[in-house]
Image (cartoon, rainbow, N blue to C red):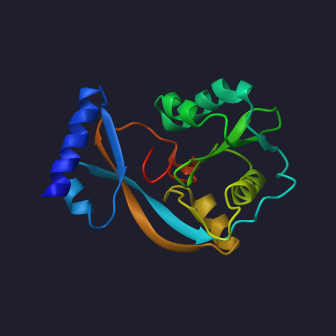
Amino acid sequence: GLGEKLTRQAIQRLRDRGCTTIRLVATQLGLPLYRRMGFHEENEYHELQGSGLGRQSTLPRGARPLLASDIDDAIKFDGMLIGEDRSHLIRRLWPQGWCLTGSEGEIDGLVIPTPWGGEYALLRPQVAPEQGVRFLGLIRSVVGASSELFIYPTSENATARRLLKEVGFTELRTMPRMVLGVARPWATAGLWSIFSPALG
């Protein structure tokens, strides 16, 4: 019962701070516990493992490091796809990361590594297929500097899963994303990774 007590305490602290939506990524072991507590499954993340490309001297066309002046556009982009204000999280990690821009210079994708491991990766779902290829190249170049890389697209992001498998990534497992409280509309077809397994 210790896990349930700790989870209930965490939920209460979040609610006391005004959180109306609580999301988590469940393991198979935790799934029954979360269901009993009222969480329901929204979708699944697919854990895929493959190799990075190492730090490359040139980024894919349209990719560049984030600048201090990009922060408002990045927060707006995140809010458009995620449906909630996560500016406090993005500001904590700023200005580490990269963006993929469209033909007009607008942000089409964000890749922000987290200090505890993993990355936050979002790509506008309506982009042309070649933007998906470039986005994957960006992730593999800047985050995948080691030989092992994990990427977590959602079930709805068939494009990411297809591209990852085409370059040799192997699917290891699926992990349900669960929600308690008010469901918010995420553009899940644009999610290429969990913010991190601990934050999202």
> Foreground residue, 93 or 105?
93
Circle count: 0
Residue 117 spot, x, y in % from top left: 54, 55
* Residue 36 seen in the figure: no
Residue 134 is left or right of residue 38, and the answer is right
Q: Quadrant of residue 137?
A: bottom right
Q: Quadrant of the N terminus?
A: bottom left
Seen in the picture, residue 57 relative to 147 is either above or below; the reply is above
Residue placed at 64% from the left, 31% from the top?
74
Answer left or right for 177 relative to 168: left
Please indicate whether residue 7 sits to the left or right of residue 163 in the image: left
Quarter of the image where one finds residue 18: top left
| Percent x, y of residue 103 | 83, 37
Q: Position of residue 151 (x, y in %)?
A: 57, 61
Classify the position of the C terminus by image quarter.
top left
Give the residue at the far left of this rendering. 1
Q: Name the one closer to the observer, 98 or 158.
A: 98
Q: Residue at x 70, y 58 (%)?
A: 136
Q: Is residue 3 visible?
A: yes
Name the residue at 67% across, 34% down: 95
Q: Position of residue 157 (x, y in %)?
A: 56, 56
